[in-house]
Amino acid sequence: MKRGLVVGEIWATRKARGLDGRQLKLVVEYPQYPEQPAQADSRADGRTSPPALATLGLAPLVVAVDTLDVRCGQEVLLAYGSGARNVLVPGPDNRYELCDAAVAMLIDPEPDPGPEPDPVQAAAPAEGAPRSAAGDDRAPATPVAKRGS
Amino acid sequence: MFVGRVIGTVWSTVKWPQVQGLKLLLVRPYHLADLADLADRPGAAGRDSPPAAEAAAAPRPQGGGGPDCEAVVCVDLLDAGVGDDVVVAFGHAARVAAQSAGTGTGTYSGPYQSPAKRSLRDASEGGPATSADRGPAIVPIDAAIVAIVDRIAVARPST
Amino acid sequence: MILGRVVGEIWATRKHPGLAGAKLLVVQPHLWYGPPFEVAHLVAIDTLGAGEGEDVIVCLGEPARKWLAHCQGAAAEAPAAGPGYAGAAWLPVEAAVMAIVDRVDVGAAPAELPGQRPLRFIGPVPGWAAVNAPTSPGPGK
């Protein structure tokens, strides 16, 4: 399966019988060059962003059958071959579906992690509250990793 | 499946008997950089497409010579002409489309029929009634035109 | 399908029994859509008698397998094991010469997509190429 970005749509009146009623979307696959990372670019704060538009200009452009009603600018996962047929008609009887590539999944954009929690406040325990569930005052044996740090 | 433009025709006399009579076209796939310039062509709509200079400077993949060497020989099922924008399917989908379109040595316009199903039906009925009942022949191809594009809309993805 | 030129032949005595009696040709593609890795040539089964220097069309995948089985006399459409795996499943063939090309008409104007990229060929420019195709050989020659 390949990850890609929806960039457009195709309309056609004259088409083969098996494509009747299908929505066709244009999806550009994210490039996988040896000297570039396969995935999206990573930024300084650890979040990822889609590859720059310049690298997408000559990336493979796929026409995929769309059952999820995706919009331009959304990141999706493409399935090919029999996997694509399973997206349209799940089960063993889909061998005669006319489909080569299908949008299998929408990739949600990464949620905003919010403001960075204050490490000093998080380390100091609340007054009077026991530090461990057993009720005694000992610190836990292994340091507990804080989420987001 | 990919979208491309028909750039030529391939003529051949010596070929497999199952593909005799099929028209073979050369189709060059489009990339996002090409769709940027289709905004002014009639029948296509492109808005906010990526600038041409950026796309031309992009590094190219190293498979089979790169995007400039790409063209596919595919079977014409819809009477496309040179210069048309078409959608081409590969592999099994191409064979399904060819069989449903009634090309090849048989004339048939219906859903794809597997040879297994046909043989079972023939065995249960004691053989096909006429030679026409044997169903459509499997067309052994790898790529076929499955749609002729009316309109392409390309929007600039917001980053 | 791929359009290419026959540049050589392969002989092998020790090979898979499914390839017994099959003629193997080395084909250099003129134009190819996105192979997953860098390729300069491919090896295809030939039953049509193509010679070196001839332009051919190569078909990939299951039709190549079934065509070889058909030529070897096996029942290519036997329903024995179910659709898709009947009779020819054991032949290790992925590419076969489907046609010997007589002529290719490439329109000079449509071959050049609007804007920036003229058509380039992987190997040397073939004789039927458009007049304004660039003569620089591809990187994977």
Image (cartoon, coloured by chain):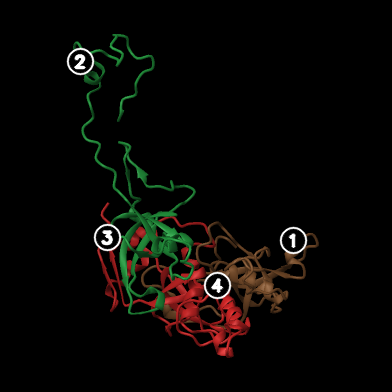
Mark 3 crowd level (few <14, some 14–19, many ≥20, 10 Å Cα): some
The amino acid pointed to by label 4 is Met
Q: Which chain is drawn using green? A: A
- Residue at disc 3, secondary structure: loop
Question: How far across and down, in percent of the image, does residue A6 sit?
Answer: 32, 59
- Residue at disc 4, secondary structure: loop
Marks 3 and 4: same chain? no
Task: From the image, tell me which residue sits under label 4.
Answer: C1
Task: From the image, tell me which residue sits under label 3.
Answer: A71
* Sequence-wise first label, 2 or 3: 3
- Residue at disc 1, secondary structure: loop
Which residue is at a point 73% across and 65% down the rendered structure image? Answer: C18
Q: Which chain is drawn using brown? A: C
Question: Real-space Cα distance between discs 2 and 3?
Answer: 48 Å
* Sequence-wise first label, 4 or 1: 4
Comparing labels 3 and 4, the label whose residue is closer to the camera: 3
The amino acid pointed to by label 3 is Arg
Report the front residue among C108 and B72: B72
Q: Where residue A126 is drawn, which disc sits there?
A: 2
**Mark 2 and mark 4 residues within 8 Å of each other at the beta carbon:** no
Q: Where residue C16 is drawn, which disc sits there?
A: 1
Question: How far across and down, in percent of the image, does residue C55 sit?
Answer: 62, 77
Marks 1 and 2: same chain? no
Comparing labels 4 and 1, the label whose residue is closer to the camera: 1
Mark 1 crowd level (few <14, some 14–19, many ≥20, 10 Å Cα): few
Q: Quadrant of residue A10?
A: bottom left
Question: How far across and down, in percent of the image, does residue B35 sit?
Answer: 34, 68
Question: Real-space Cα distance between discs 2 and 4?
Answer: 71 Å
* Quadrant (top left/top right/bottom left/bottom right) for the C terminus of chain C: bottom right
Tell me if B138 is positioned left or right of B41 in this view.
right
